[in-house]
Image (cartoon, rainbow, N blue to C red):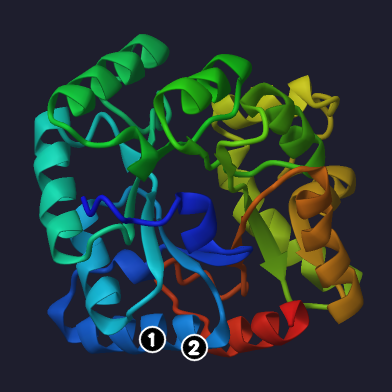
Amino acid sequence: MSDTAAPLKETVGRYGVWNAGLRAEDPARRGEIAEAAAELEELGFGAAWLGSSSAPRQALPLLEATSTLTVGTSIQSIWQYEAEESAAAFHEVDAAHPGRFVLGLGVSHAKLAEHYRRPYSALVAYLDALDAAKVPAERRVLAALGPKTLELSRDRAAGAIPYLVTPEHTARAREILGAEPLLAPEFKVVLEEDPERARAIARDVLAMYLTLPNYTNNFLRLGFTEDDVRGGGSDRLIDAVFAWGDEDRVRARIEEFRTAGADHVALQVVTGTGDHDELPREQWRRLAAVLS
């Protein structure tokens, strides 16, 4: 890593885009992804977060197509790659594009990871191995929800990238992290003004996450009830974890995270098409206009 690399808080800016399609490795899509990355940079987004279980090599098309955009994994599951393999990939990408790649790590979920066991201890051991391989703490972030992992984000990483959270969670996370570490929550946006349609689109997406105890337990800690996390989520829960409505409402919801203590908000546009690898470039343009 370049010794002169700017602090992560400065390079990611206030807003970024979270998208699973940006990590696609189909050679036929490489040009499309490069064009999308270049446009995101032009639109003023400071970071692109490779959604789902992503890897450092998948950042290369975006980094090669841009000059200032920070690209991060959100997240790389610690169960999918050995720490030594992850470290080697980090160093390869960072050598080609110094200071522009950030390794986002997380423990995934018991239902999704075959070898899931003692996740906190496994994450600590993974960070120990990254330290031994000289992956700098200031270029890695953790997908932290609970207090212990947020403390780990503070002590062993550059900060936290919590997924599927509320401004109230952000405020609690900031208290644990303190002032200096990066706090960059993900937040979902539905650019739809009709409440019934917006909530239906959101509920289709949220239903899958509500089968994963890591998320439902976090919602319960935040004061939601068992009824809120059933049936795809109550309107109360939907309205807390998605921004929808007109431009003023969407902007205000995003700014709630900043007011609560977020340095950066990773925005995931939800379109309702069901295409998980979609690159919603028209919606990104609309969102950039809202934020400007």
Q: CB under 8 Å between callouts 2 and 1?
A: yes
Q: Which kind of residue does numbered mark 1 sit on?
A: Ala
Classed neighbour count for the residue bearing mark 1: other residues with Cα under 10 Å, few (<14), some (14–19), many (≥20): some
Q: Is residue 79 above or below residue 237?
A: above
In the rendered image, the vertical position of residue 147 relative to residue 215, given as above or below: above
- Residue at the image point whose x is 75% and y is 49% from the top: 241
Helix, strand or loop at disc 2? helix
Depth check, front residue: 258 or 233: 258
Residue 173 found in image quarter:
top right
Query: Picture quarter containing residue 60?
Result: bottom left
Where residue 240 sits in the image (x, y, percent)?
Answer: 82, 48
Q: Residues within 10 Å of mark 2 (few under 14, many from 20)?
A: few
| Residue 73 x, y percent position in the rendering | 36, 52
The percent position of residue 118, horizontal first and vertical second, equals 36, 9
The residue that disc 1 covers is 38
Amino acid type of the residue that numbered disc 2 sits on in the rendered structure: Glu
Q: Name the residue under label 2.
A: 42
Mark 1 residue element: helix
On screen, residue 270 versus residue 2, left or right, reads right
- Residue nearer the viewer, 51 or 192: 51
